[in-house]
Image: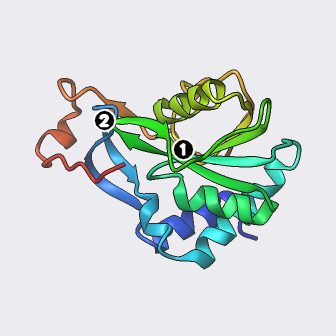
Amino acid sequence: MQTTNDEVLDIFRNTNALLQGHFILRSGLRSEYFFQCAQVCQHMAEVSRLIELLKPKLESIQFKTVLAPAMGGLVVGQEVARQFGARYIFAEKENDRLVLRRGFKMDPDEPILIVEDVITRGGRVNEAIEIVKANGGKVAGIAVLVDRSQGKASFDYPLVSLLEMGYPTFDPENLPDHLKDIPAFKPGS
């Protein structure tokens, strides 16, 4: 019988969302593996299945609205909102910082679930948390498809992930020998 982790990894591999090579992460760190969730997000049946697998882990979190950081969290966040019958809003980049635009507003103390595709350090999630606080909402929790932080991403709110993968990251000045000869590629995040 296939485990949930095996099914999730199969979905990522079959949609070319799990890549192997030499990648420059948004943080500037390097990795041999990269989750390009945009690849899986082309296939709505697979996105729906991933959220179906995540959904039981979210049942204890009470939220009214889903907030997704652009770009990575957009499709994933929308599907979470659809499956839970919640309102959906998103934050987008402006001068490389996330902002709430397009007339999106939050009610005072409105419970907000932040949904992201992948976290390594949690930078965009932290920006989304600040947006919720600045707009009077209340962070109910955080949901991600893949937590690759190896426990380093820490928040004051419940964090739920579908998959935890501990691929190592490296400082560009301290690469392992097997990555030094592979050209680095920034796939986009």
The disc labelled 2 sits on which kind of residue?
Asn
Residue bearing mark 2: 95
Residue displayed at 11% across by 44% down: 181
- The tag on residue 96 is none
According to the image, label 1 marks what residue?
A: 165
Instruction: Report the side of 66 relative to 62 (left or right).
Output: left
Which residue is drawn at the image coordinates 60% and 69% (left, top)? 47
Looking at the image, residue 60 sits to the left or right of residue 135; the answer is right
Foreground: 87 or 32? 87
Q: Is residue 68 above or below residue 176?
A: below
Q: Nearer the viewer, residue 155 or 147?
A: 155
Identify the mark nearer the N-term, 2 or 1. 2
Give the answer, above or below, for where 171 lies relative to 185: above
Q: Is residue 1 above or below residue 24?
A: below
- Per the image, label 2 sits on a secondary structure element best described as loop
**Picture quarter containing residue 44?**
bottom right
Residue at 50% x, 44% y: name it.
101
Q: How is the image coloured?
A: rainbow
Quick check: can you spot residue 96? yes
Mark 2: few/some/many CA within 10 Å (<14, 14-19, 20+) = few
Q: Position of residue 90 (x, y in %)?
A: 56, 49
| Lateral position of residue 180 relative to residue 109, left or right | left
Per the image, label 1 sits on a secondary structure element best described as loop
Amino acid type at circle 1 is Met
How far apart are the two marked residues, 2 and 1, measured between alpha carbons?
30 Å
Q: Nearer the viewer, residue 87 or 129?
A: 87
Question: Residue 168 at x, y = what percent?
Answer: 40, 35
Q: Residue at x 71, y 42 (%)?
A: 113
Q: Position of residue 54 (x, y in %)?
A: 73, 56
